[in-house]
Amino acid sequence: MRRASVTMLFVAVLAVAACGNAQTTSAGRVSRGAGGDGAVGGESSQGGAAGAGGGFSVPALLVDDSEVTMASPDDVPARRDALIDFLWGPTGLPTWLPTAVERGVVNPIATVPVANLDRVDRLVIEMDQGITNEAFHFVPVSSNGRLFIVHGGHAYTLDGYGFPETIAALVARGYGVLAGQMPCYSSFACPGIPQHQSSPHNRLIAEVTPQEGSVLKYFVEHLVVSLNYLKTQAALGEFAPYHDFSMAGLSGGGWTTTLYAALDPTISRSFPCSGGKPMYLRHCQGASIACLDGYSGDAEQMHFPLYKHVAGYLDLYALGAAGAGRRQVQVQIRRDSCCFGEKQYGGVASIPGLTWNQAVRAYERKVQQFLGSAGPADHGWYSFEIDETAANSHVISPTTLAQLILGDSDGDRQPVAGSTSGTVYAAGRYRHLWAARPDWVYTGFDAVGTPAVVEWNEATVVVVRDPSSALVVAREGTPWTSEVWAAAIASNPAAATLGGTELHVVAVGVDSRLSHWSSAEGSPVVQTSADPATPVVGTPVLLSSPAGLDVLVRRMDGGVQHLYRHGATWLSERVTTETFRGFPSGVLAEDGALHMYARADDDTLLEAVKPLAEGVWTSSSMAQMAGVPGTLFAGSPAAALDPESGDLVVVERLPSGDLGRLVAAHDSPGWAYQVIGRPDGLPPAQGTASLTFSPVTVPGGIYARGQEGSLWFHSEESGWAWVAQGL
């Protein structure tokens, strides 16, 4: 293999000429050649820039934040210092502790049971000018040493909008949670502003002058002070010490997440959900309370002294993502009932000539280019993700929770798709879909998430979710060509062939149900709903055999669903009664039995087996069967049947950052267990400190992602070899 010679192409920007106009085939599908740089489905992901020099002008555009105004990641510390100075003045970040810590208060969540919860502590934070806020510390019984801030924003309760489900899922996994609300929305009213008054922040900003700094400090000071306590007082507070910090918030809490992650580099992962958009996309007309000085939103989201003179929104996104090992995932709901989605894009708040998809992908690209401007090393990661499932809602949806917040924080997703030791496909930093066969080439297509790859009619076919969420089937050739099979999907796709002539694809649809598409060469695409009754989430597993099709997919309630079509119709059943973490993997054994693998709620690895003859599912502990009881795992497993030996191989990441490999040889009973150490001491950059996300098994070895964004391949014969950087 030529792994050592592979160049760092994920962070390069290619100039590939667009070719051809789309044309409709006789099957009624859209066919196209490989598009230009960032072009998919006729939509350029670069698009026109806003503001000065950006190709258009908006009347009365007072704040143009359409560019990252820092030259490189080297400028981040100085800009962060400027942001802190703007908020607090010469005194800098607060160093004091909460005014009071009340142990064992009533759980503010009543609608969802919280497993693994020891107690809830209430932290009271007094600020100047009589402004007081509070935060709730959810202390887990069993801690993983990681703290997650969940911010409720403009909600007077933490018992709605997806907050209870998010907090419960995190605490169950061992995270401590700090739950907070915006000033004037907690149990402490702002002085002179009655509770539940419409837009209290407009009055707060207009009427309150802090002793030092900006009035905006009241929106984040409660977090700084709370973390001062949580980072230093573990022994006194009788909770496990925290070594890692992340944050998520909805609406005003999403805006708070953007601002706080920008000023605090200890926030390693941040997920601002439905929480804001750049000023140049907020322009409005009229004199309503929602249109102040020509911009729409709450006063804190349009505060000119911040966005015009210190850091615009693109600067804030870059600050929140910048730094080795840091990630920011901005989530917007396409059909949001409130704000920031596609239906709120238009009129003077739009960019002439660009759709909403193009406009948001344009600024995503600019932030990504800034982070990649200093070379291929890890300088942070930023992405814009579209929630297609939360129609007419304004919530942290089950899709956002499972696929993005937990999927990223717990490392549940697989970063690449591979078919052999020399063939791998991945979406790089700029959404470009790359193929290594064995050297990296840009396919001409863009992708969100992880593609699926199959061989169909003597050609390689890559199935992707493109940046507009369309389901695209791309065929390798000179040039590559593609067809759009669905307008929108809500998960990574899975693909398989049946009988060598039929291509089958499954994915979670925008209705959170499993959808199925199929086509024979030259025939129309047929779409069906495999199970209209069961809500599911995450990347499914699609397996084909002479018996038909089998699908394994995570249920919304944490179980795993088995959907199968062994005849003319789809049937559906639950796989055992257990609930799981992450996403399942599976194989069809040589005897026709279906084997499912998933990480259980206690982080052990379970195997569930169903015989070919429509038998009953039975589950067993993999660690017990391999003679290593008590072994815990992380992320999602990868399972494969070796085509040469017939051995069944299951690989999963260990909490240590190494890999655990379990093998059931076809000619001997039982399972063998092997720990595969991370690639320490190897070039480039002397290997990796830890492996993250979930491994990918292919004949001959394993693909795995390093903590610093590198891709590695491990073979039984030669060990680790570096593949690429910037993933």
Image (cartoon, helix red, strand yellow):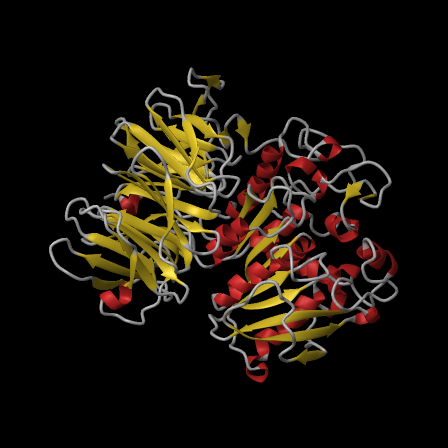
- Would you identify the image quadrant in which residue 528 lies? top left
Judge by depth and name the residue closer to the eye, 201 or 3.
201
Residue for point 48% across, 35% down: 466
Quick check: can you spot residue 696? no
> Where is residue 257 shown, x and y percent of the image?
63, 57
Closest to the observer: 451 or 400?
A: 400
Q: Position of residue 280 (x, y in %)?
A: 71, 39
Q: Residue at x 43, y 30 (%)?
A: 527
Q: What x and y, as percent, mark residue 118?
A: 54, 76
Horizontal side of residue 480 vs 491, given as left or right? left
The reply, left or right, for residue 647 in relation to residue 122 is: left
Where is residue 107 drawn, in percent x and y?
A: 63, 71
Against 492, residue 321 (above or below) is below
Q: Is residue 653 above or below residue 546?
A: below
* Residue at the far top in the pictured view: 26
Nearer to us in this view, 537 or 484: 537
**Left or right of residue 656: residue 337:** right
The count of marks equals 0
Quadrant of the frame with the N terminus: top left
Task: Give the residue furthest to the bottom.
Answer: 236
Quick check: can you spot residue 155?
Answer: yes
Q: What residue do we see at 41% from left, 38% from top?
A: 530
Answer above or below: position of 119 versus 548: below
Task: Please tell me which residue is depicted at 84% across the width and 69% down the height of the picture.
Answer: 129
- Compared with 6, 558 (above or below) is below
The answer to which quarter of the image holds residue 217 is bottom right
